Image (tube, rainbow, N blue to C red):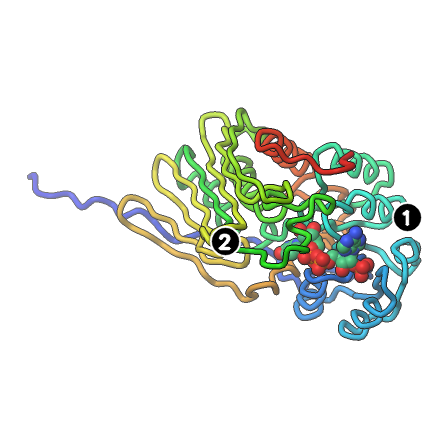
């Protein structure tokens, strides 16, 4: 009798993502509103990895619209956003203007009865977001925030780890997005009139990550406390922000900066272990799960970098075909709550945009 008993090894096989192949989503006819930097990456990703139809583009500039249409094989060029949203051959509009203009441009598309995918940050503030939600409900169409990370395969691995309780009780969330960003003093990131500042541009990712963890871990999604600190640019927008956010018994620390390359890492710590998303956690990334001294990893991404922008478009097409008017992975109520948190952080840091509605 007696002797040593072997300690059972924890199972560190990470769950597989449930993310559908974007090529399987039923095709919609898309119009691109504002063919700037990110719209080019989005269109390239959608063309390469999905069966979605890119049929029309709307720009304030005929030359820009024509060049974009040529590059992405689109049939129709509109020289105003009104003409784009009124195009009867368009089912869904991708709004890729600066976030200062998302409210106005998304309202145009919603009132024309189109499904709408709105780039992050969804709007400047929660009040504008509520207006869009109400317009979408009136029109009976699908409205989604283009927070593309929510739709990536590695995000579903994290979601499943949390939903399955593999970390035990969640106590701490950390998420970081800092880059030494802007050299050009005329860039929209520095311009208060274009809702510049790092919080809405980059900080919205760690805020959304923390909220997604709270949702999947069964914590309150509405923060129970927010304390922020930050510094401003000479133009009066936020250059760097850190915030401590309470989600019931758990706390999140989020950090964002355009002054320093602090990394793009996200971690969740629970009573049994922790999960960590690789540096570059907002694009398709790897995940590691640590329980005690043992670690397991998942990194089976087939689509990399900006190619990952295709997943949200495929999700919208699938939800629209199912008759949904809200995304199950990022419901509009949660988008509004995240912007309420951003509003509170901006209030504490002292950033107000001109003509903010
Ligand atoms: N998902 C991501 O990874 C990601 C990355 C970067 C940016 N974004 C988001 O995408 C949005 C656009 O960012 P971007 O970097 O693509 O910007 P950008 O290159 O400056 O393009 C924005 C486009 O918006 C249109 N626009 C309409 N009104 C404007 C105004 N008053 N001032 C400037 N442009 C105006 C312009 O198109 P026309 O003049 O041709 O109509 C312009 O090409 C932002 O909300 C940003 O946060 C997302």
Q: Residue 290: image x %, image y %?
A: 34, 48
Q: Is residue 332 above or below residue 54?
A: above
Count of numbered circles on the image: 2
Residue at horizontal 42%, vertical 52%?
14
Q: Which residue in the protein does label 2 denote?
A: 281
Q: Pick whichever, 259 or 327, lies toward us.
A: 259
In the image, residue 55 above or below residue 257:
below
Q: Is residue 319 visible?
A: yes
Is residue 26 found left or right of 276 in the rendered image?
Answer: right
Q: Where is residue 26 in the image (x, y as percent from the top left)?
A: 75, 60
Residue 109 horizontal/vertical position (percent): 85, 49
The N terminus is located in which quarter?
A: top left
Corner quadrant of residue 303: bottom right
Quarter of the rendered structure image containing ligand 1: bottom right
Q: Distance between the residues labelled 2 and 1?
A: 36 Å
Kindly identify which residue carries mark 1.
Answer: 112
Q: Where is residue 188 in the image (x, y as percent from the top left)?
A: 68, 52
Element at label 1: loop
Q: Residues within 10 Å of mark 2 (few under 14, many from 20)?
A: many
Considering depth in this image, is 350 or 31 the residue closer to the camera?
350
Pointer 2 with pointer 1, Cβ within 8 A: no
Near-viewer residue (118 or 27): 118
**Which of the marked residues, 2 or 1, is nearer the chain's N terminus?**
1
Considering the numbered disc 2 on the image, is that residue within a helix, a strand or a loop? loop
Q: On the picture, is 46 further left or further right than 288?
A: right
């Amino acid at each position: 009798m007696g002797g040593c008993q072997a300690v059972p090894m924890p199972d560190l096989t990470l769950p597989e993502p449930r993310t559908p192949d974007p090529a399987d989503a039923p095709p919609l006819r898309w119009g691109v509103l504002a063919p700037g930097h990110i719209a080019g990456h989005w269109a390239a990703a959608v063309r390469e990895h999905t069966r979605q139809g890119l049929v029309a583009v709307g720009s304030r500039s005929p030359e820009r619209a024509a060049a974009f249409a040529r590059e992405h094989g689109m049939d129709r060029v509109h020289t105003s956003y009104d003409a784009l949203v009124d195009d009867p051959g368009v089912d869904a509009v991708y709004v890729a203007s600066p976030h200062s203009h998302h409210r106005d441009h998304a309202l145009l598309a919603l009132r024309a009865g189109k499904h709408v995918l709105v780039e992050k940050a969804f709007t400047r503030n929660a009040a504008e977001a509520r207006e869009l939600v109400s317009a979408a409900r009136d029109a009976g169409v699908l409205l989604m925030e283009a927070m593309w990370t929510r739709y990536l395969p590695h995000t579903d691995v994290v979601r499943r780890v949390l939903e399955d309780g593999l970390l035990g009780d969640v106590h701490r969330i950390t998420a970081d997005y800092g880059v030494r960003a802007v050299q050009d003093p005329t860039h929209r990131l520095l311009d208060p009139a274009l809702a510049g500042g790092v919080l809405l541009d980059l900080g919205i990712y760690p805020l959304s990550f923390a909220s997604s963890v709270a949702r999947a871990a069964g914590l309150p999604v509405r923060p129970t406390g927010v304390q922020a600190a930050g510094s401003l640019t000479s133009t009066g927008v936020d250059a760097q922000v850190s915030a401590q956010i309470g989600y019931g018994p758990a706390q999140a620390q989020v950090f964002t900066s355009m002054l320093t390359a602090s990394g793009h890492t996200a971690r969740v710590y629970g009573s049994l272990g922790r999960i960590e998303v690789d540096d570059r956690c907002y694009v398709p990334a790897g995940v590691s799960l640590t329980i005690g001294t043992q670690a397991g990893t998942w990194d089976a991404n087939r689509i990399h970098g900006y190619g990952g922008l295709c997943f949200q478009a495929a999700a919208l097409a699938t939800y629209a075909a199912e008759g949904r008017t809200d995304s199950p992975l990022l419901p509009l109520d949660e988008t509004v709550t995240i912007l309420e948190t951003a509003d509170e952080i901006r209030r504490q840091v002292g950033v107000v945009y001109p003509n903010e509605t």
